[in-house]
Amino acid sequence: MRYNFVLDERLGIRLPRLILEWEEYTADERNDILLIWEEIRAKIPDRVIALEAIINRKQIQLSREENFNMCCYLNLEIAELASIINDLNIWFRVQQDFEPDKIHG
């Protein structure tokens, strides 16, 4: 196959892996890729909401935590979740103007 979508474990969504430059795909292939991407893209807001809920729980836990090492650990987890949300928001903005540099695996 000249393209596929691979699960990114960190983000929790499948990302496009294109072998060719965008312009080298036929119009039908580009349409197929965009249809698949739009289905995946539509799930990103729900993923962000779920991650925000986890962050909120960890922030509550952090506010009650007295152990310094555990506070550091919770802060690290919150920062990683925030980083994932940021990356998901970037991917959410990738639409029909796919830029080959952004989507090559």
Image (cartoon, helix red, strand yellow):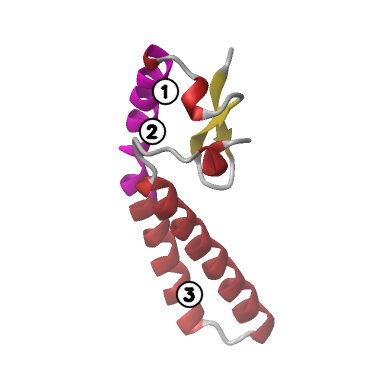
- The N terminus sits in image quarter: top right
- C-alpha distance separating marks 2 and 3: 32 Å
Instruction: Give the vertical position of 81 relative to 59 (above or below).
Output: above
Q: Tell me which label, 1 or 3, sits earlier in the chain.
A: 1
Residue 89 versus residue 93: which sits nearer the camera? 93
Q: Residue at x 64, y 84 (%)?
A: 67
Q: Residue at x 45, y 74 (%)?
A: 59
Residue 62 inside the magenta-drawn segment: no
**According to the image, label 3 marks what residue?**
61
**According to the image, label 1 marks what residue?**
33
SS of the residue under disc 2: helix
- The outermost residue toward the right is 69
The x, y position of residue 94, in whole percent, is 39, 44
Type of amino acid at the residue the image marks with label 2: Ile
User: Where on the picture, by quarter, is residue 75?
Assistant: bottom right
Type of amino acid at the residue the image marks with label 3: Gln
Q: Which residues are magenta?
A: 28-47
Disc nearest the viewer among 2 and 3:
2
Type of amino acid at the residue the image marks with label 1: Ile
SS of the residue under disc 3: helix
Mark 1 and mark 2 residues within 8 Å of each other at the beta carbon: no
- The C terminus sits in image quarter: top right
- C-alpha distance separating marks 1 and 3: 42 Å
Residue 50 versus residue 84: which sits nearer the camera? 84
The x, y position of residue 95, in whole percent, is 35, 39
Mark 2 and mark 3 residues within 8 Å of each other at the beta carbon: no
Return the mark for residue 15: none
The x, y position of residue 8, in whole percent, is 57, 39
